[in-house]
Image (cartoon, rainbow, N blue to C red):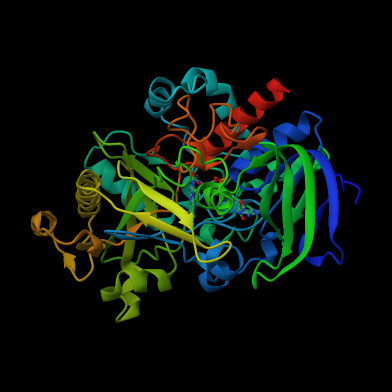
Amino acid sequence: MELPRGQLLRADTFTSDETLSCDVVVIGTGAGGASAGVQLAEAGLSVVFLEEGRKWEPHELSNKQSWAVRNIYAERGTSVGIGNIFIPMPRGKAVGGTTLINSGICFRTPAAVLSKWRENYGVPWADEAGLASTFEEIEHAVGAVRTDEGVWRRHNELFRNGCEALKLEGHSAIVRNAPGCIGCGLCQVGCPVGGKGSVDRNLIPRALAAGAAVFSCARASRLLVENGVAIGVEAFGCDPVTEVVSRRLEVRAKKVFLCAGAISTPIFLLRQKLANSNGRVGKNLHVHTALGVVAKFDEVVDGWHGAVQGYYVRLPGENAVLETFSASPDIYSVQYEQYSKPMNQLRHLAACGVMLGDTAEGRVEPGAHEPRSKISYDTNAEDVRVIKKGIRQIAAIYFAAGATEVHTGFSRAGAQKNLAELDTLLAEDRPWDQMNIYASHPMSTCAMGSDKAWAVVKPDGEAYDVKNLIIADASVFPTSLGVNPQISVMTVATAIARAQLKRG
Ligand SMILES: Cc1cc2nc3c(=O)[nH]c(=O)nc-3n(C[C@H](O)[C@H](O)[C@H](O)COP(=O)(O)OP(=O)(O)OC[C@H]3O[C@@H](n4cnc5c(N)ncnc54)[C@H](O)[C@@H]3O)c2cc1C
């Protein structure tokens, strides 16, 4: 087939097998794939994107979580890390990847993290000053702006009030790539008004305008390798809901960018036993361990109204942040069941999560069949210490804002009416798996670095073991970040694409 330049086609509607050639084929259109692909396309290369999910317009999305997990979440929203705790690890499956369903929070990679990557892992370009213009460019491209007070609504205001009452330093409305936010509280089921700058709305259209082709509903199944060199990808049309596989699509390319995210990228390689001579693919899984605390107020809060994650404060002395969040009543009633009878109690809740850069490590392996995952993850005492410190700080903030009680997310622990009661609970030696931990930022499963005994890819993204196979997504971070990762993913992928362009 001729390269359909500038077009987005659904591969699950093809009626014949197809073969085509291009300069670069990019697997995945999420934060990493879109950022890398747009650089390559705008430099004049012919680029083909393969994306397992579908392209969605805002009006086609539904505000129901049950619809979202079936249609725009990978593995129907059920991927989970199992170990000494149980951690849901959701991710997106759509043109735009996880950015379609994220909260839009934008943080730059912390300077201390970049220094560690440079000094301990040999990534020479990981430098705050050197990357400053790239961060700025990315933030501009995705529309990052500080959340306007007009869309905070009450749940964010209460958190701000508590931070002010305690005279905390460094609290602020969060910068999000949601310039058109109307505060409807639906970010995580896809923005229904197109107010969020997920990459399907900015970087992918730019790549199309530069002549790239996007095949949606196309699952990349196999890397084509000849004599240790990547020469293309075998993909199949794939219905995004039923996962029924249809026609074969072979894309021959001079370089393959693998940007399927930190769960799917290692699975793709491990299924074929590729790029893994040091046994590191899928290991070194890091996440931002998170736990939500809810607070009950006498006043009606209706926490599901307003910017989902609009306000934050750093946790002093730790690589962690406290970020407000909201969820729909059905989610609150499952997580904090004591408030679901009677249900109108849910109207009085505000919520904030502690989220930390973990020191524990997990592992990703292929699940029973394509594309299922098997994720193992054990937390450790150090990370639990930080979670408990965060819980206490959130509770202090909410009590200062007038909350009558807090609920920590510990199963069956009930609510605490003051900090003394909370301290008693936190001092108890409860099993860690009684905590309702959550982690939506998997990272580091194909880490980059200068030591080929440890790293999977070089600092320029190329796999040590497979020439012309480049990885440019959250899996290349050597370590956890401690802040929400999308801007870091986009910046790292941009840096890798530029390094590859320089190499020619
Ligand atoms: C609910 C939720 C909220 C979040 N909120 C924030 C936030 O507010 N701020 C923030 O910074 N981060 C947030 N994140 C995380 C952030 O969105 C991700 O870290 C980031 O998108 C990861 O980028 P990526 O390119 O590595 O992967 P992704 O963005 O997940 O993209 C990977 C893409 O590859 C596709 N793919 C996978 N396998 C194949 C295959 N075999 N063939 C073809 N295509 C394939 C997938 O369908 C997907 O589209 C959130 C995550 C979740 C789940």
Residue 344 lies in quadrant: bottom left
Image coordinates of residue 345 in percent, x first then y, are 31, 74
Taking the image as shown, residue 208 lies to the left or right of residue 63, namely: right
Q: Is residue 137 visible?
A: no
Which percent across, then down, holds residue 58? 67, 60
- In the drawing, does residue 280 fall left or right of residue 267? left
Q: Is residue 413 visible?
A: yes
| Residue that sits furthest to the front in the current view | 227
Q: Residue at horizontal 79%, vertical 56%? A: 249
Residue 229, relative to residue 266: is it above or below?
above
The residue lying at 39 percent from left, 47 percent from top is: 287
Residue 346 at what x, y percent from top left? 34, 71
Query: How far across and how far down the image is residue 121, in percent?
Result: 42, 25
Q: Nearer the viewer, residue 203 or 394?
A: 203
| Residue 467 figure quarter | top right
Left or right of 358: which side holds 384? left
Given the current orientation, which residue lies at the most extreme bottom position? 342
Image quadrant occupied by the C terminus: top right
Q: Is residue 204 above or below residue 479?
A: below
Numbered-mark total: 0
* Residue in the picture at 81% in, 30% down: 44
Looking at the picture, tell me which residue is in the foreground, 364 or 116: 364
